């Protein structure tokens, strides 16, 4: 029960941080980098099979809170999670050290891909991908968002695993 409550609090914290902090400080960003970073980090830490149980509820809640309806963002993030899982297995790159730049670039590419995805669904223009932003500033903010989310979710995942181990120890 405590683990479920902690996950709900984490979802609420991520949604509040995305909508109240990142959305206000960076209003020109075309995609929610905090949510995208969380999906990439969960996929790296837990694998696709376990991360999907966090990706779908988080992105559905984000869509519902943002627009009041379910949009294609959830479907796109499932595709991103699968792509990250595929790349992490094929490239066999650890998600520590210099590889964080690679995964931050994946977050930035996912944000650009989301713009393309929306343009294809809505039959609108693709350009400019990032209105009012330079690519360097976009990638640097994506790196900061990824690094912060990675450090937060790594600690959170370790704590949850510790709680699971303790509860398994006390139930026997």
Image (cartoon, rainbow, N blue to C red):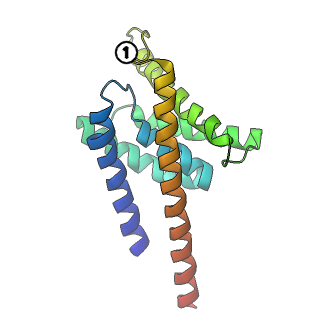
Residue at image point 29% right, 48% down? 16
Asked if residue 9 shows in the view, the reply is yes
Q: Is residue 165 above or below residue 109?
A: below
Task: Tell me residue 116's x, y (percent).
Answer: 47, 18
Task: Tell me residue 125's x, y (percent).
Answer: 40, 8
Quadrant in the picture for the N terminus: bottom left
Residue at image point 49% right, 34% down? 142
Task: Tell me residue 5's x, y (percent).
Answer: 36, 68
- Crowdedness of circle 1 by 10 Å Cα count: few (<14), some, many (20+)? few
Q: Nearer the viewer, residue 19 or 49?
A: 19
> In the structure shown, which secondary structural element does the residue marked by tag 1 occupy?
loop
Residue at image point 51% right, 22% down? 136
The residue that mark 1 highlights is 131
Residue at image point 67% right, 41% down? 99
Quadrant in the picture for the C terminus: bottom right
Specify the quadrant of the image occupied by residue 134: top left
């Amino acid at each position: 029960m405590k683990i479920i409550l902690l996950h709900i609090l984490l979802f609420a914290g991520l949604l509040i941080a995305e909508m109240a902090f990142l959305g206000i400080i960076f209003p020109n960003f075309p995609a929610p980098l905090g949510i995208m970073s969380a999906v990439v980090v969960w996929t790296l830490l837990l694998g696709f099979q376990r991360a999907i149980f966090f990706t779908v509820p988080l992105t559905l809640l984000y869509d519902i809170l943002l627009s009041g309806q379910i949009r294609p963002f959830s479907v796109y993030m499932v595709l991103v999670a699968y792509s990250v899982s595929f790349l992490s297995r094929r490239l066999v790159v650890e998600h520590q050290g210099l590889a964080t730049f690679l995964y931050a670039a994946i977050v930035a590419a996912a944000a650009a891909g989301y713009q393309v995805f929306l343009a294809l669904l809505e039959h609108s223009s693709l350009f400019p991908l990032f209105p009012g932003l330079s690519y360097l500033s976009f990638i640097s903010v994506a790196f900061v968002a990824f690094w912060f989310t990675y450090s937060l979710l790594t600690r959170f995942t370790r704590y949850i695993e510790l709680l699971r181990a303790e509860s398994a120890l006390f139930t026997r």
